[in-house]
Structure formats: structure tokens, C-alpha cells
Image (spheres, rainbow, N blue to C red):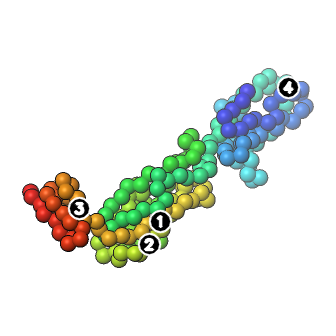
């Protein structure tokens, strides 16, 4: 019987006196979640394999074996690998785990300059400090938690805050207003609200 992500080796007919050796063998990119023989969970051996061995006797007519395999994360893909954010701005970026059926899809987020550009270690929400200097850069590293070997980087460049456009609703802390006119040359904004 086939299993998604691997196979059981050693399944065949045996005669009394034979030694049965059943091994759960994962395909590339997969790992063994568990090997069960006659309802008992078989632990990973010192050799790193999930393997069951016993001698066949007349009392034992049938052995039932099953295995479950899980997929590792093979790579990560982001909607954007370079972000231009201004001081005080927050951004929620999306990173996709490939393959989609990876067993452990947890991601770990970190920043090369956490005082300037912070990132929530669980959600990936990026926030640029209000004191961040225009032109500075930070690298957000996203790591797949399953093995800790699959990583990707997102570069955050700090840019000047743009002048709001006419009709734009701006939230500035406790004050919310609508821009009625703006000019980038004079760096002025007229507003109501």
C-alpha cells in the first residue's frame, strides 16, 4: 500500500524463523511522523530510522504496519521582497510556505536593526520607528521553524513620508482628517475634520 511522502520497506510474506524488518522510508522533502506496528508506536532508532524487527513464529499470523509522513518546508515566497516604508509606518507582509501541505508552517521573524525596524516574531507585522532616518535599511529574516534551514530576506528601506493626496483620509494618532488640498512643492496640506 502506498503512502503520501514515503513507503514501508520490508512488507512481504514471511515463514517461521525469518526475521521481519519493516522500515518507514520518507521521500525527499518528507520525514517520518510515526511508524505503527500492531497498534504500537515504534520510536526512532539510534541510527535515525524508524524500523521494526522481530522473528516470525507460528503464533503470529499477521502483522499490521502503517506509517505517517510529513512534508518539510522547501522554500518561502513573499508578496514583496523589498519594502519602502516611512518612519512610524506599519506593514503586514505575507509569506507563503511551499509546499502548501508542509507539516509545520510556523515562521520565525527577526530584524537586523530591531530599534529602527521592528517585526513581530509570530505575525510578521513590520513597524518602522518614528526616529528612523530616511535612506537607512534593515533586513527582515523569515525562517521556517520546522528545521530552521529554510530562510528568506525582506529588505526594508526607510523613505520620506509622502504628502497626502486630495481626498485621502489620514489617521494621525488621535486626530483623523480628510485632505482637501495638497501641494508637494510647498509641502502643505489643507484639511477638514
Q: What element carries label 3?
A: loop
Residues under numbered marks 4 and 1 in contact, where contact means CB atoms less than 8 Å apart: no
Q: Which residue is drawn at 75% across and 35% down?
A: 8
In this picture, residue 171 sits left or right of residue 131: left
- Upstream in sequence: badge 3 or badge 1: 1
Residues under numbered marks 1 and 2 in contact, where contact means CB atoms less than 8 Å apart: yes
Q: Is mark 2 on a helix, strand or loop?
A: strand
Image coords of residue 62 (percent x, y): 77, 24
Marks 4/1: CA–CA distance = 58 Å
- Note whether residue 156 is visible: yes
Marks 3/4: CA–CA distance = 76 Å
Q: Name the residue under label 4.
A: 13
Q: Mark 3 points at which residue?
A: 164
- Upstream in sequence: badge 4 or badge 2: 4
Q: What element carries label 4?
A: loop
In this picture, residue 51 sits left or right of residue 106: right
Q: Residue 62 carries which label?
A: none
- Upstream in sequence: badge 1 or badge 2: 2
Of residues 106 and 152, the one drawn nearer to the viewer in this rendering: 152
Identify the image quadrant of the N terminus. top right
Marks 1/2: CA–CA distance = 7 Å
Please identify, in this view, whether the residue under mark 3 or under mark 4 is nearer the observer: 3
Q: Is mark 1 on a helix, strand or loop?
A: strand
Image quadrant of residue 41?
top right
Amino acid at each position: 500500500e502506498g503512502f503520501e511522502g514515503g513507503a514501508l520497506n520490508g512488507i512481504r510474506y514471511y515463514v517461521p524463523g525469518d526475521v521481519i524488518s519493516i522500515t518507514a522510508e520518507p521521500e525527499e522533502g518528507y520525514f517520518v511522523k510515526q511508524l505503527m506496528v500492531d497498534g504500537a508506536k515504534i520510536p526512532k532508532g539510534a541510527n535515525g530510522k524508524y524500523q521494526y524487527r522481530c522473528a516470525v513464529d507460528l503464533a503470529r499470523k499477521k502483522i499490521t504496519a502503517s506509517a505517517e509522513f510529513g512534508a518539510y518546508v522547501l522554500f518561502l515566497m513573499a508578496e514583496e521582497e523589498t519594502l519602502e516604508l516611512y518612519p512610524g509606518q506599519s506593514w503586514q507582509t505575507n509569506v507563503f510556505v511551499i509546499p502548501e501541505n508542509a507539516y509545520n508552517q510556523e515562521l520565525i521573524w527577526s530584524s537586523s536593526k530591531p530599534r529602527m525596524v521592528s517585526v513581530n516574531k509570530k505575525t510578521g507585522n513590520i513597524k518602522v520607528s518614528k526616529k528612523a532616518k530616511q535612506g537607512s535599511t534593515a533586513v527582515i529574516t523569515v525562517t521556517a521553524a520546522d528545521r530552521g534551514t529554510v530562510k528568506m530576506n525582506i529588505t526594508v528601506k526607510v523613505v520620506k513620508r509622502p504628502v497626502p493626496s486630495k481626498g485621502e483620509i489620514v489617521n494621525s494618532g488621535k486626530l483623523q482628517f480628510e485632505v482637501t488640498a495638497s501641494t508637494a512643492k510647498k509641502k502643505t496640506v489643507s484639511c477638514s475634520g
